[in-house]
């Protein structure tokens, strides 16, 4: 993974970011171990990169499937169920990008090795920061593969349920049972603590005309959030109508799920009535418990055709119910942006975190904010 125009450490760090977005705890220490492993192996050989990363970046059996899917999306190609890298031979990969036509190919090169993995990975790292509205069709295809392996870990909350723990309060029942099991001999005291579970996440995705360039990527993000972990996720689309699409997003395949959403949503690329729809959500679902104690995320540019005062009142109402309210605005990343639109200005006083939503990197940051690991 060396050569002109490719920053090997940058590619590996980007790969680790993609793994973290998919729910793998690939921290800096593990990335350092990966770089060290590749120093003594062949960093330009796809199979060496695959196995080095699998051994250094994964911490549990649950990480292996996520790792395989992220590797295939980030470096190109595919990975078999048994962990073998499909279509990869132990030949050093070229990483130089030529301005002229394709490089001459030897007779024993397979068609699947036509594009070097390092170049694919470098382009994936660049793609992370590209605005969704500026992507080409090919880049959108690569983006969809990366979003398909996304995960949205919820913010943990302590429950009333108790579980065994090394540290915590004294557990008399388990301690007595242990003493009886030992025939009356003294036993170390057993302890317990309150169990944790992730908070519910509610996503309100704007599908109005002003969000047309972002709606597909944001709905794919919502689909990944609904399938990427133990977090209970509810998804609604907002425009001129409020539509609950949680059931449509239960399809495993993102394409099938989005086709079902398209059939269920009657107001694609219409106007925006945020205040009225937020009131409808709170009256029918939020007040009954869906928003209570949840992390509510609004993915919208904040354009409001209705009364801004109504939106402000409903946002205050939502803020009283929810644990946190997060607003992700794709327009926020534009140079000179200021929340001057009437709807956005009315909503901001009731927003706990105001973040960008225009790129894959922005969605990764949004996931961190939802998890409670980062403040905006």
Image (cartoon, helix red, strand yellow):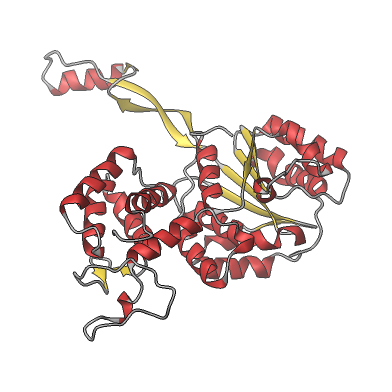
Whether residue 36 is visible: yes
User: In the rendered view, would you say 358 is above or below 3?
Assistant: above
Determine the residue positioned at 31% across, 50% down.
62
- In terms of image quadrants, where is residue 315? top right
User: In the rendered view, would you say 143 is above or below 199?
Assistant: below
User: In the rendered view, would you say 164 is above or below 200?
Assistant: above
Q: Is residue 303 left or right of residue 118?
A: right
- Residue most extreme to the bottom: 107
- Viewer-closest of 322 and 173: 322
Tell me residue 186's x, y (percent).
Answer: 14, 13
Q: Is residue 141 left or right of residue 86?
A: right
Determine the residue positioned at 44% across, 62% down.
123
Tell me residue 141's x, y (percent).
Answer: 51, 69
The image quadrant where one finds the N terminus is bottom left
User: In the rendered view, would you say 234 is above or below 114?
Assistant: above
The image quadrant where one finds the C terminus is top right
- Viewer-closest of 55 and 115: 115
Q: Is residue 324 left or right of residue 114?
A: right
Tell me residue 160's x, y (percent).
Answer: 47, 27
Whether residue 72 is visible: no
Determine the residue positioned at 52% across, 46% down.
232
Determine the residue positioned at 32% across, 77% down.
112
Tell me residue 187's x, y (percent).
Answer: 16, 16
- Residue most extreme to the top: 186
How many labels, in total? 0
- In terms of image quadrants, where is residue 298? top right
């Amino acid at each position: 993974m060396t050569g002109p125009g490719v920053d090997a450490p940058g590619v590996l760090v980007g790969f680790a970011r993609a793994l973290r977005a998919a729910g793998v705890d690939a921290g800096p220490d593990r990335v350092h171990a990966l770089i060290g492993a590749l120093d003594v192996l062949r960093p330009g050989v796809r199979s060496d990169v695959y196995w080095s990363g699998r051994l250094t970046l994964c911490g549990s059996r649950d990480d292996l499937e996520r790792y395989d899917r992220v590797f295939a999306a980030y470096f190109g190609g595919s990975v078999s169920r048994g962990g073998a890298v499909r279509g990869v031979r132990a030949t050093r990969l070229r990483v130089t990008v030529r301005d002229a036509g394709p490089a001459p190919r030897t007779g024993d090169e397979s068609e699947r090795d036509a594009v070097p993995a390092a170049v694919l990975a470098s382009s994936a790292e660049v793609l992370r920061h590209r605005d969704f509205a500026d992507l080409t069709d090919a880049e959108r295809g690569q983006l969809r593969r990366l979003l398909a392996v996304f995960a949205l870990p919820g913010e943990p909350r302590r429950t009333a349920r108790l579980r065994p723990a090394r540290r915590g309060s004294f557990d008399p029942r388990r301690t007595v049972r242990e003493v009886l099991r030992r025939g009356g001999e003294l036993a170390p005291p057993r302890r317990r603590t309150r169990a944790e579970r992730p908070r519910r996440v509610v996503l309100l995705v704007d599908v109005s005309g002003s969000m047309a360039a972002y709606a597909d990527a944001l709905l794919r993000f919502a689909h990944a959030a609904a399938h990427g972990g133990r977090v209970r996720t509810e998804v609604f689309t907002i425009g001129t109508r409020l539509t609950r699409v949680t059931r449509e997003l239960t399809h495993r395949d993102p394409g099938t799920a989005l086709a079902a959403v398209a059939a269920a949503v009657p107001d694609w690329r219409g106007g925006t009535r945020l205040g009225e729809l937020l009131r409808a959500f709170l009256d029918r679902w939020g007040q009954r418990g869906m928003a209570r104690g949840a992390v509510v995320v609004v993915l919208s540019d904040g354009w409001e055709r209705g009364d801004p005062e109504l939106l402000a009142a409903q946002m205050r109402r939502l803020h009283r119910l929810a644990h946190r309210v997060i607003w992700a605005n794709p327009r926020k990343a534009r140079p000179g942006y200021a929340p001057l639109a009437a709807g956005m200005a009315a909503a901001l006083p009731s927003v706990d975190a105001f973040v960008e939503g225009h790129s894959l990197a922005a969605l990764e940051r949004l996931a961190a904010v939802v998890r409670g690991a980062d403040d905006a």
